[in-house]
Amino acid sequence: MRNQTLGAAGEDAVFHYLQSRGYTVLDRNWRIKAGELDLVAISPEKKITFIEVKSRSSRKFGDPLEAISAQKAHRLQKLALAWLVVHGYWGSDYHIDCAGVIFTNEGRYEIDYRKGVL
């Protein structure tokens, strides 16, 4: 699977994962000049949640969540604040979650979902 296809498949998997757990997805692949937010949702507890998704075809080169560097985390926080301002949610309670998706050769996947990472 190519990286772009793998990333889209991972985001789709996490989208369905969130919906099955009572989240309402508000935005997918929201992009501004500074970067992109993979998913934005409202949790069952009514908290705005920004979800960074990292997908891999194996753990050969490490866990997908290891790809979230301090620099990436800082950019995610700035993007989250920008999204809140643009969409009229400034001052709302929010958190940033991360999801690592590993795909197998059989087309199956597993999701490692971490709440409130940032």
Image: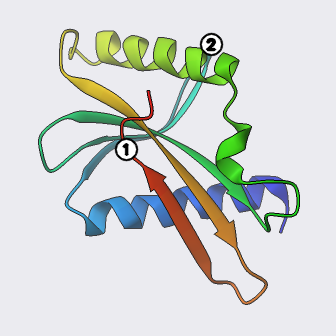
Q: Tell me if residue 3 can be seen.
A: yes
Task: From the viewer's perspective, tell me whether residue 43 is left or right of residue 50.
Answer: left
Instruction: Look at 73% across and 90% down and name the residue there.
Output: 106
Q: Give the tally of numbered discs.
A: 2
Q: Is residue 7 above or below residue 71?
A: below
Q: Are marks 2 and 1 in contact (CB under 8 Å)?
A: no
Task: From the viewer's perspective, tell me whether residue 61 is left or right of residue 77.
Answer: right
Q: Mark 2 highlights which residue?
A: 34
Residue 32 x %, y % = 56, 18
Residue 90 x %, y % = 23, 10
Q: What's the residue type where badge 1 is placed?
A: Lys
Nearer the observer, 110 or 25: 110
Q: Mark 1 highlights which residue?
A: 115
Q: Tell me which corner region of the image, top left, top right, bottom left or bottom right, holds residue 94.
A: top left
Q: Is residue 3 above or below residue 57?
A: above
CA gap, disc 2 to disc 1? 24 Å
Q: Tell me which corner region of the image, top left, top right, bottom left or bottom right, holds residue 20.
A: bottom left
Residue 86 x %, y % = 33, 13
Q: Is residue 68 above or below residue 101?
A: above
Instruction: Look at 64% across and 46% down and name the residue there.
Output: 65
| First reached walking from the N terminus: tag 2 or tag 1 | 2
Which element type, helix, strand or loop, lies under badge 1?
loop
Badge 1: residue crowd in 10 Å (few <14, some 14–19, many ≥20): few
Q: What's the residue type where badge 2 is placed?
A: Ala
Instruction: Look at 80% across and 68% down and name the residue there.
Output: 58
Q: In the rendered image, which quarter contains the C terminus?
A: top left
Which element type, helix, strand or loop, lies under badge 2?
loop
Outermost residue to the left: 45
Outermost residue to the bottom: 106
Instruction: Look at 63% across and 83% down and name the residue there.
Output: 108
Q: Tell me if residue 32 can be seen.
A: no
Residue 49 x %, y % = 32, 36
